[in-house]
Image (spheres, rainbow, N blue to C red):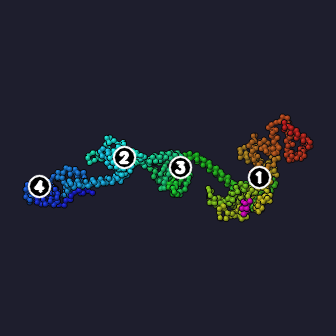
């Protein structure tokens, strides 16, 4: 509110120069004013008529009807409603009349300010201010005290008594230095701050001076407890320390890191990324990631909440990969972290490429096994029995009948199964092999029938096709069928009968068109007798049966197969074998080949590797084979010559040994084979025994 208006006496009537002495006396008596504004006829202030002017007119004993015109004081001070308290104070001090006239914008008097009205008003506002100040000091969070000019405390607020844990009467009139030891009144001239501690609390004290009524200066001290701030500052220091540790870790642990909040705005970015993508550091934080780094594609992860890894990406010639990780708080997605990998990426890429190559190769080879690889043309044989089998095989291939192939290990049962499949009407369909002996019992069912999505917990939740599914429209080859558990035999029997099955965890009946070819090297009849193989399954499998003869029963094939293997292995291993010693052929013909054709192939592979001059020698054959056919002594002869023994004697010794092997140790049979008598044989045996002992 306007200060002048508050202390002025309102004026609604004035004197004019035409007013008489009598009228002026009456006016002043009525208003009790010592100074009366005088206006012209337009109401504008022209001067004042004071009580002293009135006394002057009375002393001159002027007529009551005399106008006051000549006794008006024109040299007057005026104020307006805009005049400040300070200006007013100054005005009252210098004013001769002790009264100020308040005029409006048109020069019209609207009020009087007398010294007493001003003083009363100042007194009133001073008291008001004092009250306000005390309220502020009492209610403030700051502790406050005031001293006199000697530094003796004359006021404390309640807050300070609590801060200093001392009652008001103990504090009053104590010396300020007892509370602020650092304070020295003499060195004090302007506001100062002190940091003091009282017990375990820390205070910041602001000390100022104030003017006392006696014109001297006292002190005002304001106390702020900063213990909490101190603790916070210490915590802040720790946080800052951790921030710089984490910053270093982040900068070094990852190639690049960027974090966005739930609004897709960048809240952190590692310096390496700023450098890599040549970004403007000042505008990044708080900006939408889609405008700064759209190629990182972090927003979709914000929406899906699912972590993912990008493919190899490229921008401005920089290759990188992004790992996008959603950040959750109480099930709410609150942001995404983008982990960018770009260092040594070419190495990762190279490894990845190699891995892809391997995978491709694996896919090709696994596809190979899914398709038939062999036909009857690839089954090499000059054996009449084998030729007959193959002719029957071609005929059997025409239908969809289940076929059982028997034969010792390595005789070519699988090869035969492939050939049947290739000759059948579904020869272009899949050929799926199941090694019944190799699948763990608990997985057999899912291997055969597959499983539905969600049937198992774990990584492969997607569901998987079983071998029956895979073989649909082709052949399912059950190798080692004699090694199946009875439990699975029952399941297999049902499928063979009904030609349909359920997937593990599934409810849908699946029908398949699959030809079954089974193979075994075990005697299923004996197993049926012992209760190890289901009779009904045996008959179901044994509709058409082929018995592949072992290699020892078709020795002519040894030569044919050997030539083929040498050619194939020369190509495969980069060797250049062009022939073999007649003794090698003889040893091979003498050997029984329990591992059959697989063993023959292995023996050739080994011999060709060891062979030194393009001609395979006896020494290149495995020891076990040579021992078995009694050719090991020949090798010894070649390697270590026994001086006492002539070559003829050595040959004689080998002949006797071979005869004994052939006759299974039967000496009279061996004598027949050698064409010598029993007594000669005994003599010779004693002689060779003596040589070996020596
Ligand atoms: N007549 C043949 N001509 C050429 N190679 C053959 C012949 N018979 C078998 N083989 C080869 O011999 C190896 C063994 O053949 P296969 O695996 O078919 O025998 P298998 O009787 O099924 O053996 P197992 O009972 O151990 O499963 C294979 O490398 C195959 O290519």
Mark found first going from the N terminus, 3 or 1: 3
The answer to whether mark 2 and mark 4 are in CB contact below 8 A is no
Q: CA distance from mark 2 to mark 4?
A: 62 Å
> What residue span does the magenta drawing correspond to?
486-494
At 25% from the left and 53% from the top, the residue drawn is 122
Residue tagged 2: 205
Q: CA distance from mark 3 to mark 4?
A: 103 Å
Q: CA distance from mark 3 to mark 2?
A: 52 Å
State whether residue 616 appears in this view.
no
Residue tagged 3: 340
47 magenta-colored: no
The foreground one among 92 and 203 is 203
At 36% from the left and 50% from the top, the residue drawn is 167
Cβ of disc 1 within 8 Å of ligand 1?
Answer: yes
State whether residue 407 appears in this view.
yes
* 105 vs 655: above or below: below
Q: Is residue 474 left or right of residue 182?
A: right
Residue tagged 1: 409
At 52% from the left and 54% from the top, the residue drawn is 327
Mark found first going from the N terminus, 1 or 4: 4
User: Which residue reaches farthest front?
Assistant: 170
Between disc 3 and disc 2, the foreground one is 2
Mark found first going from the N terminus, 3 or 2: 2
Q: CA distance from mark 1 to mark 2?
A: 101 Å
User: Which residue reaches farthest top?
Assistant: 643
Q: Is residue 514 left or right of residue 240?
A: right
Between disc 3 and disc 4, the foreground one is 4
Residue tagged 4: 55
Q: Position of residue 107 (x, y in %)?
A: 19, 57
């Amino acid at each position: 509110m306007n200060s002048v208006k508050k202390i002025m006496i309102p004026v609604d009537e004035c004197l004019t120069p035409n007013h008489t002495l009598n009228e002026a006396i009456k006016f002043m008596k009525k208003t009790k004013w010592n100074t009366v504004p005088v206006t012209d006829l337009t109401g504008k202030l022209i001067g004042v008529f004071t009580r002293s002017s009135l006394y002057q007119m009375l002393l001159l004993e002027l007529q009551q009807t005399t106008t006051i015109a000549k006794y008006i004081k024109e040299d007057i001070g005026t104020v307006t409603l805009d005049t400040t308290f300070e200006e007013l104070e100054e005005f009252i001090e210098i004013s001769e009349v002790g009264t100020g006239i308040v005029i409006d914008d048109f020069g019209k008097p609207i009020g009087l300010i007398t010294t007493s009205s001003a003083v009363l008003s100042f007194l009133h506002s001073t008291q008001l201010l004092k009250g306000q100040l005390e309220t502020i000091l009492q209610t403030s969070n700051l502790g406050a005290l005031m001293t006199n000019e000697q530094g003796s405390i004359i006021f404390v607020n309640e807050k300070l008594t609590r801060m200093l844990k001392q009652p008001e009467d103990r504090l009053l009139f104590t010396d300020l230095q007892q509370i602020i030891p650092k304070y020295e009144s003499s060195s004090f001239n302007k506001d100062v701050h002190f940091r003091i501690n009282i017990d375990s609390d820390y205070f910041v004290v602001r000390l100022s001076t104030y003017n006392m009524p006696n014109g001297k200066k006292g002190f005002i001290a304001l106390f702020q407890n900063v213990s909490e701030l101190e603790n916070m500052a210490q915590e802040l220091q720790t946080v800052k320390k951790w921030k710089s540790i984490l910053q270093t870790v982040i900068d070094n642990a990852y190639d690049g890191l960027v974090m966005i909040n739930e609004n897709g705005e960048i809240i952190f970015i590692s310096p390496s990324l700023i450098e890599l993508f040549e970004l403007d550091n000042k505008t990044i934080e708080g900006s939408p990631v889609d405008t700064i780094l759209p190629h990182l594609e972090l927003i979709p992860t914000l929406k899906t909440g699912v972590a993912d890894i990008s493919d190899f990406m490229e921008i401005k010639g920089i290759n990188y990969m992004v790992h996008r990780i959603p950040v959750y708080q109480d099930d709410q997605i609150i942001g995404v972290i983008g982990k960018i990998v770009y260092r040594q990426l070419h190495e990762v890429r190279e490894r990845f490429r190699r891995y892809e190559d391997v995978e491709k190769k694996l896919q090709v080879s696994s596809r190979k096994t899914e398709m038939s690889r062999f036909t009857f043309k690839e089954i090499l044989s000059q054996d009449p029995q084998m030729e007959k089998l193959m002719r029957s095989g071609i005929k059997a291939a025409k239908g969809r009948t289940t076929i059982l192939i028997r034969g010792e290990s390595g005789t070519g049962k699988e090869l035969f199964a492939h050939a049947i499949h290739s000759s059948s009407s579904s020869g272009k369909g899949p050929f799926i092999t199941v090694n019944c002996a190799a699948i763990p019992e608990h997985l057999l069912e899912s291997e055969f029938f597959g499983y539905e999505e969600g049937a198992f917990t774990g990584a492969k939740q997607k569901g998987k096709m079983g071998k029956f599914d895979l073989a649909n429209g082709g052949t399912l080859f059950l190798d080692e069928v004699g090694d199946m558990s009875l439990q699975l035999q029952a399941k297999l029997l049902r499928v063979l009968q009904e030609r349909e099955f359920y997937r593990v965890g599934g409810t849908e009946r699946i029908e398949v068109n699959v030809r079954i070819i089974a193979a075994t090297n075990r005697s299923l009849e004996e197993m049926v007798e012992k209760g190890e193989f289901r009779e009904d399954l045996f008959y179901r499998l044994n509709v058409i049966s082929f018995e592949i003869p072992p290699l020892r029963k078709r020795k002519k094939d040894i030569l044919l197969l050997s030539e083929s293997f040498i050619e194939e292995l020369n190509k495969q291993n980069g060797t250049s074998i062009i022939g073999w010693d007649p003794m090698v052929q003889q040893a091979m013909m003498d050997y029984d080949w329990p591992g059959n054709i697989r063993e023959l192939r292995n023996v050739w592979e080994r011999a060709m590797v060891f062979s030194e001059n393009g001609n395979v020698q006896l020494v290149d054959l495995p020891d076990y084979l040579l021992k078995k056919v009694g050719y090991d002594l020949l090798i010894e002869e070649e390697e270590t010559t026994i001086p006492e023994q002539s070559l003829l004697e050595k040959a004689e010794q080998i002949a006797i040994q071979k005869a004994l092997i052939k006759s299974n140790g039967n000496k009279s049979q061996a004598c027949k084979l050698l064409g010598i008598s029993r007594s000669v044989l005994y003599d010779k045996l004693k002689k060779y025994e003596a040589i070996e002992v020596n």
